[in-house]
Amino acid sequence: MAVSDEIQQLAKEWLRLDRNPATRQEITDLLASGDEADLRKRLASRIEFGTAGLRARMEAGFSRMNDLTVIQATQGLVAYLLAQHGGDPTGLSVVLGHDHRAFGSLSSARFTRLTAAVFLHKGIKVYYYRHLVHTPMVPFGVKALGATCGIMMTASHNPKADNGYKLYWNNGCQIIPPVDAGIAAAILDNLEPWVWDDTLVESLLATPGNEHKVEDPTARMVQAYMATVRDLDALVSMRDRNRHVPALRVCYTAMHGVGLPFIRRAFDVAGLPPFFLTPEQVHPDPDFPTVAFPNPEEGKGALELACRAADLHQCRVILANDPDADRLAVAEKQIPRDGSAPYWHIFSGNQIGIMLAAFVMDGYRRKYGASTKLGCLTTTVSSMMIKQMAHDEGVEFEETLTGFKWLGNRAIAMETEGRADKVFFAFEQAIGFMCGDAVRDKDGVSAGVCVAELAHWLAGHPDEAHPHTLVEFLQSLYVKYGFFASNDGYVIEPDPKRVDAIIIYICPTERLLGRLRPSLNTICLQIQTPRRT
């Protein structure tokens, strides 16, 4: 089948620019087979850079994640940064991290090395996490190191062939408009590769005397991050108030991701008992062999092996991170009093959110006192039970658009504007939680420590009338603040044009204002029952 002249010209341009033999071969083979449809999908549009950075399937094409599009995006970012600083790279720096994703010749690690080379080419210092890190280490590193920006190569819980380029600004938050538009325009002005080198950053690291150019800050940043986890744990922990703490067993799964070493060390610095493992899923594996989608939000299907391991070790609580460990799912074993069969209750993101909000709020109040103005946030697709809690407790509350880019930036704004002295918590129903202020983004590790502390405290509470399980604690919050329910789900639509059409149909005003540009649309129905007084 003949390929149109338009597509042939696009393929010719791709082959002129691309220097990766494997992805060049992909386009060459598609030309030879005359696959116009696949070539058009890959070449006729460009991958769009937005507030979420980049995210797409790893394969050849202008609309995909690959060496060329990553280099082009980075060149646009670097050009934008230099333009904002008068063309002088002095004092500019970037924190780079990556997960374990790999598909064919493409991988998160390779994309990170290529990205480092672009920054180094323009004289910008690179803080390069040489080995795997969980996503929160990048925004944490940006703040701790005073970096200009940070990039994490990860597709979080997407299918295995996907990857992403997640950008954080100098405040440690994901970017928001108009920064994204400025970078997107700069990308289009810098499509010709400046440099294509996936060995430069490693060779500079291996050569003494290059510390002013590149540095691996992993050891000191992990130590600093764990110190904040220890401080957060000291703030929320109530275990020392229990005289007799029964053995509460916790089971953990990393969902084939990078979370294990970080949450294991976090439990250790917090003084929490070690957890049991889901052996098939705790080590990084880019094939994600035991799950259709590596997303613990999927529920029973994704947590089947964790439930099996937890039953084997007689664990009451399951903690599950997504592959880049910025999200947290929680399940608890229920033993009905009527003698019926035990079962696992998998908490929704909204349920975990209100439990953490109440628990962390109490910790902040114990430490800082009633005179400190506290603040919390959630997004418009999440349960408003936290709003009711904030109202009843005299806490400042704000509702934002979807995404932690808004939650993180607004948390900072609430403090700088004087609305709150300390924003202690934010969450979104898609199992993302920000506990404390060390990371202004979702963090599945610090959230996991807080849930474990809550579960241990409840299990050992000496008052028989007090809740002793997470489910009982949740029920007590319903009684206190009112009963709230939600029924939410998601639909994956890979075609951006169809997503645009759906958004215009559902919410034309928001779309025209350019405030919504999702690649994954979430619709949330909330049913709220007022509290009886």
Image (cartoon, rainbow, N blue to C red):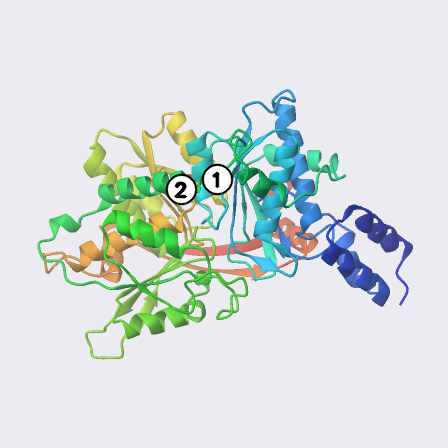
The number of discs equals: 2
The alpha-carbon separation of the residues under discs 2 and 1 comes to 8 Å
Please tell me whether mark 2 sits on a helix, a strand or a loop: helix
Q: Nearer the viewer, residue 392 or 352?
A: 352
Quadrant occupied by the N terminus: bottom right
Residue 246 falls in which quadrant of the image? bottom left
Q: Residue furthest front?
A: 208
Residue 366 falls in which quadrant of the image? top left
Q: Tell me what residue is drawn at x 27 percent, y 36 percent.
A: 394
Q: Tell me what residue is drawn at x 52 percent, y 69 percent.
A: 292
Q: Is residue 6 above or below residue 159?
A: above
Q: Nearer the viewer, residue 299 or 272?
A: 272
Instruction: Assess whether mark 1 and mark 2 are in contact (beta carbons under 8 angstroms).
Output: yes
Please tell me whether mark 1 sits on a helix, a strand or a loop: loop
Question: In the rendered view, does 448 fall on the left or right side of 242?
Answer: right
Residue behind mark 2: 219
Q: Name the disc covering residue 58, or none.
A: none
Q: Is residue 27 above or below residue 428?
A: below
Q: Name the disc covering residue 216, or none.
A: 1
> Could you classify mark 1 by the number of other residues whose Cα lies within 10 Å: few (under 14), some (14-19), or many (20 or more)?
some
Q: Nearer the viewer, residue 532 or 71?
A: 71
Residue 13: x percent and y percent? Answer: 83, 48
> Could you classify mark 2 by the number of other residues whose Cα lies within 10 Å: few (under 14), some (14-19), or many (20 or more)?
few
Q: Residue 528, can we see it? A: no
Residue 478: x percent and y percent? Answer: 27, 55
Residue 23: x percent and y percent? Answer: 73, 56
Q: Nearer the viewer, residue 56 or 345?
A: 56
Residue 18: x percent and y percent? Answer: 76, 49
Residue kind at label 2, given as amino acid type: Ala
